[in-house]
Structure formats: C-alpha cells, structure tokens
Amino acid sequence: MLRDRFDRIINYLRISVTDRCNLRCKYCIDKDFPFIQRDEVLTYEEIIRFVRISARSGVKKVRLTGGEPLTRRNLPFLVTEIGETPGIEDISLTTNGVFLADRIDELTAAGLTRVNISLDTLKPEKFAYITGFDVFDRVMEGIEKAKHAGLDPVKINTVIIKGFNDDEVLDFARFANAWEVEVRFIEFMPFSQTSLWDATKVITSDVLMHTIRELYELSPYRNAHKGPASMFTMKGGPGKIGFISPISSHICKDCNRIRLTSDGKLKPCLFSDQEYDVKALLRGGASDEDIARFVAEIVHAKPEKKFEGGMIKKCQRPMRNIGG
Ligand code: SAM
C-alpha cells in the first residue's frame, strides 16, 4: 500500500498520455507554445509497465487525460491493457469530447467505464471563442453518445471564469437536470501560459452555490467514486452539481492521487513544481523493484497541502502538460 507521511493512502494515478490537444482553450494554452518532442513522450509499453508496478504497490484507479487523450493513436489498446492489469478496478477518461462520439464504441468495448467531458459554455459562439474551434455540436453529440453507451456517471467539467461564463451558472444547473449528468464547477487555477489568469477572474464555489440556491434546493450527495468535488442533488431534478474548490478551500487532506506526465515525470501534487523522473528509470534498465521503491519514496515526499506561505503558487507547467 502507498501511504504518505500524513497517513493518506495513494491509490489513484492520473496519466497524461499526450500534451497535444486539438483545441486551444485560451485559459489553458498559449498559441505558440512548443509541444514535447515525440520521443520524449512515454510509449504505451512504458505506461503499461508503470501501471503494473504501481498496481502492485496499491494503485487501484487510473484516469487517462492530457492534452487531449483522444488525439493519441489507438487509445483503446491502452484502456484494455490498463483495465486488465491485476489490481486496477477503475479506468476512466477526461476528454474535451470532440472525438468522443466517433470513439465511444471502441472505448467502451475496451473497458472504459466512466468519462469526464470538459465544457465551459453552452453557447456555440462562446465555445468557438474560448476553444478556437467551432465544434460545440460535436461535444454535445459526444455527451449524448456517452450517456447512450451507458457510461455512468457522465461528468461535465466546467471552469468558471469571471466575465466569460459566470452568467451561465444557472444554465449549467438546468443542463445537469435536462441531460441527467453531473456538472462540476471548477475554480479557475493559476498555471503557466495561462496569461488569462488573474485572481479577479476566480469565482469561488461559495458564490456559485449561492447563485444556484436561488433556484434550486441543494442536498449533499456522496457518490461511490468520492473525489475532490462536493456534490449536490437538486430538488425536483435528476441532475447533480458539484464544486471543486482548489483555490478557496483545502481539498488536500483527502488527496489520494499522483500524476504521471506525458514525458514521464511523476508529480505528487498538482500545485507543486516538484516532479521526479520515472522515464529515466524506465529507459535506463531499472528493475520493477527499483521503480516501486522510487514511487514509494515520491509518495512519501507528497506535500501536505498546496499552499506555500499562505498563497497558492503559479505552477510552471501548463495543465495540458501535467494532465488535468
Ligand atoms: N483535453 C482534456 C479535456 O479537455 O478535458 C483533458 C485535459 S484538460 C487540461 C483537463 C481539464 O483541465 C479541463 O477540464 C480543463 O478545463 C481544465 N483546466 C485547464 N486549465 C485550467 C485552469 N487554469 N484552471 C482550472 N481548470 C483548468
């Protein structure tokens, strides 16, 4: 079992399979930022070996993310291999949804059980503005197909940015009910390259909750896959909403995750620039035991919480690079 110095059990591995993305969300990526060289990106064989070693140490859940994971060729192969790894109980995906309608059958056949789809606006013209591409309808089709394929729950990740989409909070609550999905509002976080970020653009979960309570009675709800979101049911509807509050609250005490970047660095904390080079071991002839020991040491070094000196720090790596 992987246990850190603060008695947290780490059983969740998020893997960024690529830093490439088919969208250019203005808050996530600056247009001209170079991508990681292909030969620096972990191969599927390297990822699968790492998952196998981690699973033996106690990792039970894996989420594939990116960049956009569906831009990487033959992702269903990776889903199957990870899903069949002894010890892995849950394999899920975070995607922008653009390619989901086309790939959903292969992905579910490969064993995918859950999906999170990012969607920051319900207005096609705003979608085209923030992502740089006029593909809103494809994302909606992806959500529909994911539901139809029986993936449950379908979660929608919505980053709220003041002046961009804070006027759509109630629309998203209605959408959660109409589409029977879980909408999770995420506080806008500071990462490098997001020249858009400044503290005045963050709207905290409290404020959002207050707005939604004007229309809906909210009751706390805890689902089987407990995560960083505080989830609520809305009286009178089947949808659920949630709040992920990395800026306004400490979600660190329940943190159960580590992250593997697309270029093979292990990050014990999303908000810290601390990272450890697993790829050097994977490519340098290290044994499984050496790698397992390395992972245990990294887990041990996991910071207690994300704040340094009372302030949340701007991370040097962009989210698409770390894996959101
Ligand atoms: N391409 C996939 C997607 O769109 O979901 C996976 C990668 S994306 C980096 C993962 C999530 O990170 C998305 O929901 C995105 O909105 C979120 N994200 C990116 N930059 C962020 C920021 N500065 N603050 C909060 N969330 C952010």
Image (tube, grey):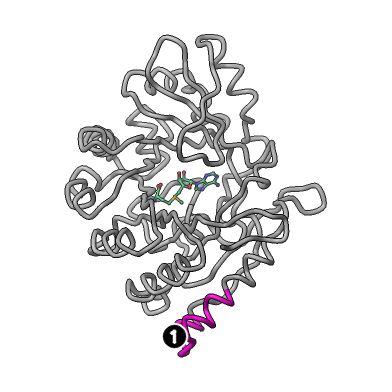
Q: What residue is shown at x 63% (from left), y 69% (from top)? A: 298
Along the line of sight, which residue is nearer the eye, 22 or 30?
22
User: Which residue type carries mark 1?
Assistant: Arg
What secondary structure is marked by label 1?
helix
Percent position of residue 31, x then y = 44, 56
Q: Is residue 107 left or right of residue 237?
A: left
Query: Magenta part of the protein: which range?
Result: 280-294
Quadrant location, the N terminus: bottom right
Lateral position of residue 315 relative to residue 45, left or right: right
Furthest residue in direction right, as rendered = 309
* Residue occupying the far bottom of the picture: 285
User: Cβ of disc 1 within 8 Å of ligand 1?
Assistant: no
Measured as percent of width and height from the top left, residue 29 is found at 48, 54
Identify the residue at image location x=21%, y=33%: 148
Q: Position of residue 12 (x, y in %)?
A: 50, 55
Find disc 1 in the rendering and name its residue.
283
Residue 15 versus residue 244 in the image, above or below: below
Secondary structure mainly formed by the magenta segment: helix
Which residue is nearer to you in this view: 303 or 224?
Answer: 224
- Residue 81 highlighted magenta (yes or no): no
